[in-house]
């Protein structure tokens, strides 16, 4: 795998200049990197994988990335969090402003469930994936839940543990589901027999998570459609 | 295509000249006094039609080889001098060896080389147009070559004056002098001519400009104390520049102190000579170690403000871009630094503007803008 660069708070696998895949945070960064690797996609031949750390920072830097020299492809992976349509609207507004210059009419009212791809003459080919699945609220941890093997004994138990915590974190109501998705996944990973305390990336490589799940296949298909096949 | 003298584009007569503007610029915000806040170029060199919608006090121009970075500096020369000085036009051609100083072509007008795709358009009548979009100070410079080979100049105070085939341009020094009349200094990748350096130092001596130039060299070599003009040891009729360097008991020829120090010396004198005008620097990083680039940019930003100079520099260097961004972010005016990237798009060259907000993202994330 290509060399990982850390630049300030930016995570980056440096690839070709013609493509950039921006992801919202470090979890997305490692999930995308490891999934590509498991699907034998030499992704640095297609794009640089970059996490500018956080949705706001990603959104603010979009126009600058779009003006990178020789850019032909730009992919964006962000979380739906509590409100998918609000996140989608925020991206549409940004991408159609006078610096990003996508035609609002080319940006669908709702994300494509298979992952959105926008082709506009004179602008880089644009792909948008909203975690977990372009249709529901949540984040990358909700996406990874779909990759937990069916009938895993400890999965349900981990959920019970998180729900019966004696003290709940002091967070806004709307963040609760996201929080419990993360807590649930990491609790489960903490108990994996071979190697307790696995990171998300390791869990993909070691096949603790099932990378052949349809949800993972859908994501990889979007990556290929955006960068590889051009269809 | 047939072009007559009445069909060219000329802007409305200017209300004030640049000299008047700079006199009244005190008390305005820094960008108020910029000579160029944007630029539009038609049918010049690599550019069929180039629009640069935004410029700052200090501008860094990037882009691949052969997209026209130097041509853009030349266009600024022509606009800044309003085409008034034929030696500016001929000097631009002579720098590139497109004309021989003493042997101008007789059959067609030598200025044809300034036109985009001049080969295809030769003898067909064609118009070159360089204009700023500031109506107050602006005014287009338009040059028309007619079918009979005659070249005509239109600017804010000339209507269709013929430009002679045969101007007495004899040297690069004549080009430098012609630019200086319009308060423009063009620093080529190899620096300024020896004559120019001697003359400029002669003017700077015993004035505050002396401290500025020595201060600039001290960015690289702290031991430099003073500069003086003295004859060469081997040929007393030739004058050259000498440095007093701490720890040495006799003067040292400035040229022996290395490319970087000589470049900095030239740049410091250049800013002073460009007061209320423009400083153009081709391949600014030439001869300069990356580690001192931030100090050099800081120094240029400060001097550009102090002397009311608008700076245009070209570069291929990432270190140079990072240093530029750093100095721009420290400058009190948040709009002073602008990076202009030129890119080929089919037959056209287009510009992309990176203002200070975007530049901060460029250097933070390592985004390629060269």
Image (cartoon, coloured by chain):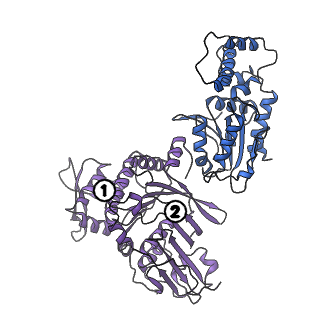
Chain colours: A blue, B purple
Which residue of the protein is positioned furthest toward the bottom in this rendering?
A: B148
> How crowded is the residue under tag 1: few (<14 C-alpha within 10 Å), some, or many (20+)?
few
Left or right of B281 in this view: A194: right
Left or right of B50 in this view: B81: left
Residue B264 position by quadrant: bottom left
Residue that numbered label 2 is attached to: B69
Q: Are marks 1 and 2 in contact (CB under 8 Å)?
A: no
Which of A134/A196 is in front?
Answer: A134
Residue that numbered label 1 is attached to: B256
Local secondary structure at mark 2 = helix
In the rendered image, residue B281, in percent from the top left (x then y), is placed at 42, 61
Left or right of B210 in this view: B144: right
Distance from disc 1 to disc 2, alpha carbons, whole Å, reads: 30 Å
Return the disc, 1 or 2, that comes first in the chain's sequence. 2
In the rendered image, residue B23, in percent from the top left (x then y), is placed at 32, 68
Q: Is residue B44 visible?
A: no
In the rendered image, residue A75, in percent from the top left (x then y), is placed at 69, 42
Residue B252 position by quadrant: bottom left
Q: Is residue B216 above or below residue A50?
A: below
- Report in which chain the residue with disc 2 lies: B
Q: Is residue B348 above or below residue A196?
A: below
In the rendered image, residue B277, in percent from the top left (x then y), is placed at 37, 67
Q: Could you tell me which residue is drawn at 56 percent across and 81 percent down?
A: B8
Q: Which disc is residue A143 wearing?
A: none
């Amino acid at each position: 795998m290509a060399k990982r660069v850390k630049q300030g708070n930016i995570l980056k696998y440096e690839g070709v200049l013609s493509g950039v895949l921006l992801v919202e945070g470090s979890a997305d960064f490692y999930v995308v990197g490891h999934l590509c690797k498991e699907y034998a996609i030499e992704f640095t031949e297609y794009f640089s994988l970059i996490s500018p750390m956080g949705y706001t920072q990603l959104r603010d830097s979009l126009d600058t990335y779009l003006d990178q020299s020789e850019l032909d492809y730009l992919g964006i992976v962000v979380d739906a969090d509590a409100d998918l349509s609000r996140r989608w609207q925020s991206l549409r507004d940004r991408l159609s402003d006078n610096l990003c210059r996508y035609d609002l009419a080319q940006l669908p009212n709702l994300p494509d469930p298979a992952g959105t791809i926008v082709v506009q003459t004179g602008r880089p080919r644009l792909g948008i994936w909203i975690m977990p699945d372009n249709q529901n609220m949540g984040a990358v941890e909700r996406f990874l839940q779909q990759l937990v093997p069916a009938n895993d004994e400890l999965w349900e138990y981990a959920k019970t543990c998180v729900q019966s915590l004696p003290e709940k974190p002091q967070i806004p109501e709307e963040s609760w589901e996201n929080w419990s998705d993360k807590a649930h996944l990491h609790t489960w990973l903490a108990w994996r027999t071979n190697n307790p305390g696995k990171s998300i990336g390791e869990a993909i490589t070691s096949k603790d998570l099932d990378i052949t799940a349809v949800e993972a296949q859908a994501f990889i298909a979007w990556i290929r459609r955006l960068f590889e096949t051009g269809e | 295509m047939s072009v007559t003298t009445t069909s060219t584009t000329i802007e409305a007569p200017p209300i004030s000249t640049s000299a008047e503007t700079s006199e009244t610029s005190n008390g305005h915000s820094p960008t108020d006094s910029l000579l160029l806040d944007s630029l539009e170029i038609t049918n010049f060199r690599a550019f069929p039609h180039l629009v640069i919608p935004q410029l700052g006090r200090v501008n860094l121009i990037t882009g691949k080889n052969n997209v026209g970075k130097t041509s853009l500096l030349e266009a600024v020369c022509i606009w800044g001098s309003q085409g008034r000085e034929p030696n500016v036009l001929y000097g631009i051609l002579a720098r590139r060896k497109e004309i021989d100083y003493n042997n101008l072509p007789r059959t067609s007008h030598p200025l044809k080389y300034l036109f985009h795709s001049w080969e295809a358009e030769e003898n067909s009548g064609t118009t070159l147009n360089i204009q700023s979009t500031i109506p107050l100070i602006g005014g287009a410079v338009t040059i028309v070559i007619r079918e009979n080979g005659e070249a005509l100049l239109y600017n804010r105070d000339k209507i269709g004056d013929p430009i002679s085939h045969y101007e007495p341009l004899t040297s690069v020094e004549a080009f430098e002098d012609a630019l200086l009349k319009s308060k423009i200094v063009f620093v080529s990748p190899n620096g300024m001519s020896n004559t120019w350096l001697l003359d400029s130092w002669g003017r700077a001596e015993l004035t505050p400009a002396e401290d500025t130039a020595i201060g600039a060299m001290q960015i690289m070599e702290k031991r430099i104390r003073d500069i003086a003009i003295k004859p060469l040891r081997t040929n007393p009729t030739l004058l050259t520049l000498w440095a007093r360097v701490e720890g040495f008991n006799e003067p040292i020829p400035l040229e022996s102190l290395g490319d970087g120090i000589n470049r900095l010396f030239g740049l410091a004198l250049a800013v002073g000579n460009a007061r209320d005008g423009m400083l153009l620097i081709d391949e600014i990083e030439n001869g300069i170690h990356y580690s001192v680039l931030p100090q050099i940019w800081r120094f240029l930003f400060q001097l550009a403000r102090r002397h009311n100079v608008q700076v245009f520099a070209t570069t291929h260097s990432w270190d140079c871009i990072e240093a530029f961004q750093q100095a721009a972010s420290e400058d009190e005016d948040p709009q002073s630094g602008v990076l202009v990237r030129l890119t080929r798009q089919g037959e056209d060259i287009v510009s992309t503007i990176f203002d200070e907000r975007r530049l901060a993202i460029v250097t933070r994330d390592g985004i390629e803008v060269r």
